Image: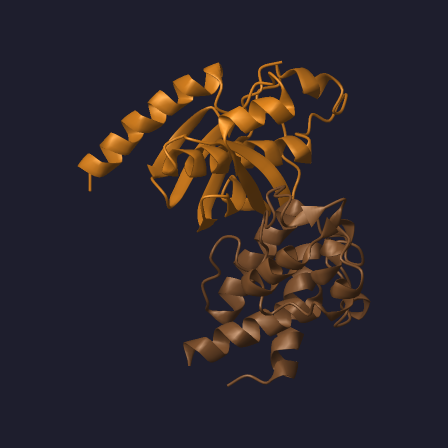
Amino acid sequence: MQTQEQIYSKVSATLVEALNVDEDEINPGSTLQGDLGAESIDFLDIVFRLEREFGIKIPRGELFPESIFQGDPEFVQNGRVTEKGLSELRARMPFADLKQFESSPELSNLSELFTVDLITRYIQGKLNNNN
Amino acid sequence: MRWMWIDRFLEFRSGQSARALKNLSLAEDYFGDHFPGYPVMPACLMLEGLAQTGGILVGEANDFRDNVVLAKVPHARFLRDVLAGEQLIYEVEISYLREEGSSVQGRICVGGEVAAEAEIFFAHVDPARAQQVFGRARFVFGGELQRMLDHVRDLKQRTKAEG
């Protein structure tokens, strides 16, 4: 059983490799795109490396959903995620910490959900389910 | 300029690995400028040849349904110059292969020495989407490569037959 610290430290090492950043640039709250400069192909790279590092399978779209709302007006209105959209997010990404996002659910803030912490929680959930 | 950086395949194991060969002739255009008196193959072209070998390997594994686009080179190391008159052997092995993308580990050997190593990532883009994004640009799987692929299919048959 790996502790959260152990998982976090492996996740950080994975991001150092995939994003070519220094370890001291990485904090639990660092956002992958904003703070660490990840681009779209990097997400696939991160997924491959996490699978290898932790010996798990990460199905397409599970950790990094490509398109949750599909432009559905029930989920997004005037650039804001609706209550129904938020429920969809909770269902699709139970490992995401939505507290801050819920206070200002602008679609443009969505990328801020994807932090180092989010990956750590996701991996922790996966490993617990495997045991 | 013809954008083919492989002369022929030596070995092709579908979905696993491939080896290809490239002869460097002093007649190649870029040697005129790179560099006068010291004809050395630009590292980016070595990488392109390796990526073409890998791109064909992963493209074939998916039956060429998608366009395979060179998306990222997380690591590359160049260990020695490669000069006109030498022969490059590209060796690639698939590390990951999924519907949306793939990665290969590759190296280039020259005269029994490792001249370069790289990890290469490919995005798999469906052809309609690729046309939208990139216009009519020729992809690796365009005309010229089609002939190379026929050669790969022959080689695959032969490799199979030889067990």
Task: Tell me where residue A100 sits by quadrant.
Answer: bottom right
Give the mark count. 0
Q: Is residue B28 visible?
A: yes
The answer to whether residue A15 is above or below residue B1 is: below
Relative image position of residue B120 (x, y in whole percent): 57, 44
Instruction: Out of A122 and B33, give the one closest to the viewer.
Output: A122
Name the quadrant containing residue A103: bottom right
Tell me the orange chain: B
Query: Which of the pair A58/B34 is nearer the observer?
Result: A58
Query: Chain A takes which shade in the image?
Result: brown
Q: Nearer the viewer, residue A2 or A79?
A: A79
Residue under the image location 42 percent in, 19 percent down: B146
Q: Is residue A119 left or right of residue B108?
A: right
Q: Is residue B126 left or right of residue B11?
A: right
Q: Residue B123 location in percent, x, y?
A: 55, 40
Asked whether B76 or B142 is in front, the reply is B142
Q: Position of residue A40 (x, y in %)?
A: 65, 46
Residue A95: name its quadrant.
Answer: bottom right
Taking the image as shown, residue A104 lies to the left or right of residue B131, namely: right
Q: Confirm whether residue B24 shows in the render.
A: no
- What residue is shown at x 59% (from left), y 32% (from top)? B48
In the image, residue B98 above or below residue A57: above
| Quarter of the figure that contains the C terminus of chain A | bottom left
Q: How is the image coloured?
A: by chain
In this rendering, is residue A114 above or below B91? below
Q: Return the x and y of residue A116 as percentages of the image width and height.
A: 70, 67
